[in-house]
Image (cartoon, rainbow, N blue to C red):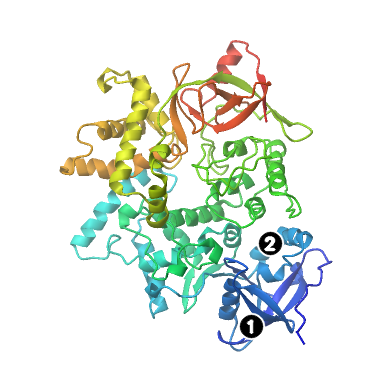
Amino acid sequence: MAVEAYEYTAITAPKTIRLIHISPGIETDPVRFSLETSPLESAPEFEAISYCWGTDQDQHQVVCNGKPLLMHKSLFGGLSYFRFPDKTRVLWADAVCINQADPVEKSSQVLLMPHIYSQATRVLVWLGAATDPVFGSVPSHTNQTILQGLQMLPSFDPENAAEMAAKTQAISYDALRLRAEGKPNLLDHDWAPLVALLRRPWFRRKWVVQEVALAKEARLYVGGGVEIEWLDIARLAFGMESLGLDKPWRLKLENPRLDSDDEKLDPGKGSTVEFRPVYITFHLISSMYMVQIYRHHATLVDGVMTTKFFDCTDPRDHVFSLLGLGAGGPTIRPDYEASVSEVFRRFSISMMIEGNSLKLLSLAPDRALFQSPEVQRLEDLPTWVPDLRLMRADVMASFTVRPQGFFAGGNGKPVLSVSGDERLLHCQGLLLDSPRRFATPLVEMLLEDIPEFRNSWETTGDPSPERRERRFIRWLRSAYQTAFGHDRACDLESEAVDSFSRTMSCGTDFLRNRLSPEQIATIWNFIQWKLGPDANKDEATERDSTIKLNYATTTRDSLLLLTLGAKFCVTESGRFGQVPLNSKLGDRICVLTGGEVPFVVRPTGSGTYTLLGECYIDGIMDGEALQEASARGMPLETIILE
């Protein structure tokens, strides 16, 4: 006779959770535990597990309250590893402690998760078994290499652009000097354990952002005894990304290939390891660290903007997984009975209308660099509602925790309303200009041979350096010729030169600060050098090497930070700009009252417009258009987006 499987009893009391009381055992023993309810306020001390779910295809059976229960392989491994050998341990894990088959309970429990992770004595991050031989037989080696790498990084102020640029430029010189002296240095450091660690899919899961950001203490575990403090990994990743050391051409952090074919990147197989450019994972960890640092001041929109590269199985969790991170602002309740489109639309209306902010509009309609056949934009979304599944390119709108970068729509508040059917967004603003001619965007050049490019990008992190450089120069030349034709640099007016330089980096440096006059001059010198006759020579003088070192990281990052998802244009009024990739002749450039940046819209022919996205138009980023309209007595318009 078959044993009856465990069935959940509904939680009826408010602010009540289930806790796992796991029986003692070693890793090879069957997993047994009792699942007990407790009011959160009076719950016994417990630890929360953070892990990557995996798929339903690979499940293991455990014993819960004396009855069989199936769970994912990842959590099964974590429970087996974390139980004590001689006493009961109290744990919380979402897949077991929440009845995932009940959407009503799931919605109410998700609302409690920020309190659960902040109340836990610590968060145990389970990264999976030690399948990679690079971890070796001595677990402490992994810990030591990470701590040694952290100690090699210089201290820096991430808000000081000049200091960051200087240290970024000097760090390679310092490493070469230490190497010559036979001392430990960043170039020769053993990064293999760190790279192996970063291949784990946990680092890309969106839910983990909240789980570690709210933790009193968080530690990362790999089976076999590897145990690392989260803050050590976070500070190392943040430092390496901030100083430009995360790129594979700086420290050769190539993603090692796996020996086993069945462990290659395949989300459908629930693999515990992934191919992914290592520098992307550095960016993800840095994003988590910044969320953790600023969580008491950041808004929910900040959280969405910061975590755009993270993945979640349920698209609604692009909103729900971050609800514990917004400081103040509109309150959103998770609702797993609502459709994905409903969740995205409600979120947008709440942030824009109740939150009285247009920041979220910078994410609309999406921020995909190219459309994947597997994931198309949701058809029933208005263009002013961002599809949060398609967030890849950075936006110009600034984070709330930092000083606002631009004021294209002035210093006032937005004037907004939504139609009764929630399809139309009524905005107050001005229609100003239109694109007249375009340069070829960089992303189009990169995707000229899509299969080859995508295979290279996904497995090794980049096309060949030579090809990347050639296309980068072609992109600069296309923008230069679109702006100036074939005029020589010596014939150009300084005002036009400065405007072009600002536009090529959307007016900001690699730290998202407004450009100084010195930085504007540096960008122009860099462009002239790249477009000059000596740009592609293999031999390099000492001066050339110095220029490359000084310019290649900070200046190139300034140019690529915001322009990869845009294309250079010259407008009908002669201004330089960076506009959405799908912009075309006949589109309109507008500013909206209270908006940080301008936007490009397309007339529908019926008095409304579709939104194409945010843009940079040099000369109107600080409210000049509204000031001029006011001086002329021009009334503002109602611009209706659909």
Tell me the distance, in whole angstroms, between the alpha carbons under discs 1 and 2.
Answer: 25 Å
Q: Please, is residue 385 above or below residue 85 in the view?
A: above
- Assign a secondary structure to mark 2: helix
Which residue is labeled 1 in the image? 31
Task: Please tell me which residue is depicted at 64% across the width and 52% down the height of the picture.
Answer: 315
Q: Nearer the viewer, residue 134 or 608?
A: 608
Q: Is residue 595 left or right of residue 220?
A: right
Residue 106 placement: quadrant:
bottom right
Query: Where residue 592 sits: x, y (%)?
Result: 61, 26
Tell me the crowding category of disc 1: few under 14, some 14 to 19, or many 20 or more residues within 10 angstroms, Cα based.
many
Name which of mark 1 and mark 2 comes first in the sequence.
1
Residue position for label 2: 113
Where, quadrant-wise, is the C terminus in this rendering? top right
Vertical arrangement, residue 405 with respect to residue 5, above or below: above
Q: What residue do we see at 33% from left, 61% from top? A: 152
Question: Which residue type does callout 2 highlight?
Answer: Met
Q: Position of residue 390 (x, y in %)?
A: 56, 45
Q: Is residue 541 left or right of residue 47?
A: left
Type of residue at label 1? Val
Left or right? Give the position of 529 relative to 273.
left
Give the residue at x 25% y 20%.
490
Question: Residue at coordinates 23% horizontally, 37% vertically from top-left?
Answer: 535
Residue 385: x, y in percent? 65, 38
Callout 2 crowding tier (Cα within 10 Å): few <14, some 14–19, many ≥20 = some
